[in-house]
Image (cartoon, helix red, strand yellow):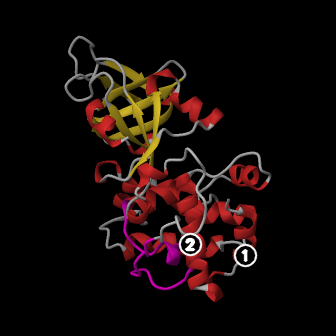
Amino acid sequence: MIDVKKIREKIGLTQEGLSEATSIPRDRIAKWEQGKSSPKAADYLILDKLLNDFEKNKNGFMKENINQNEVVDRFVTLWKELNIKSLQEFCNEIGISIDQFYDIENRKNQIDSKLKDAIFNKYTFSHKWFLYGIGNFTDKNEESESLENKIELPKNSFHDKLFLNKVSNDLKLIPVYDLNFAAGFVELIRDTNPEPIAYLTIPEVQGCDYIIRAKGDSMVDIINDKDWIGIKRHSKENIIYSEIYAIVSNEFQIIKFIQYSSNEGEVILASKNKDYPPYPYLLDNIIDLYIVRTVLPFSKIKTLI
């Protein structure tokens, strides 16, 4: 089995540094090293890619920690490197506000793993350049070699379902959870870190954070009962009106259109099914927000996993 601590120390990273480099939570890395849990198949791919990069570029990669100030400097100019028309457009695409951008630029806030994921999922450029300053912005992200000849994957893993030889940095592994969004999905993810039933790399799900189940008929003809949806966390300060969102509040977790309201601090929640009338809702009552980026019929998911 893979020795995570040995890999981390070989690369020269602390647990925090490894977390920053991979977007894997630090507490999960600590549990692996303590033998309290084991990496899943997707984690093996990430660690293998990191080790490959290190071995190909030892001098540039050997850092005790990622230099966060340098990462912020590259982040601040990224929208120009990508030839995006405006800073506002860039912020909208990665799910942050202009104020949040300037907070990062002024070192009031850090670039967390969710923001890095949003950037890497949305745009194609050199991740190694962005994180470590190695190479150039336009360098290609090299494909990971297969893990099959390097380490023993855990039994009962998703090895047979991942097509490991074909996974690259341009095809993200999106976790599929057999959980209903309305039945407390967010709390389950946060509190229990459940194991996905599979990972998908198909184009339709790229850019999503999770694939989960939908239930009910309020969005029928767009999202039917038992369909699966791909969701991506979204800032409520940058709502795109008339899009479908998975909405978390203290009162409910529902899937609705969010429409514009002329009343300040308020939006309209609407269903596709006319049996469910639209109603106003205060933005302050929304705790978390996910935009629905794709819908996969129940029958299609069955053939994929």
Q: Do the residues labelled 2 and 1 touch (CB within 8 Å)?
A: no
Q: Quadrant of the C terminus?
A: top left
- Local crowd at mark 2 within 10 Å, few (<14), some, or many (≥20)? many
Horizontal and vertical percent position of residue 196? 51, 40
Work out whether 245 lies above or below 238. Answer: above
Give the amino acid at mark 2.
Leu
Work out whether 110 lies above or below 222. Answer: below
Work out whether 220 lies above or below 61. Answer: above
Does the stretch in magenta take in 267? no
Disc 2 from disc 1: Cα separation = 18 Å
Left or right: 88 with respect to 274? right
Instruction: Please name the residue shown 60% across and 60% down the image.
Output: 152
Q: From this viewpoint, is residue 113 visible?
A: yes
Q: Label for residue 131?
A: 2
Magenta range is 122-143
Q: Label for residue 161?
A: none
Q: From this viewpoint, is residue 111 visible?
A: no
In terms of image quadrants, where is residue 227?
A: top left
SS under mark 2: helix
Q: Main secondary structure of the magenta part?
A: loop
Residue named by callout 1: 10
Horizontal and vertical percent position of residue 11? 69, 75
Instruction: Please name the residue shown 67% across and 50% down the image.
Output: 38
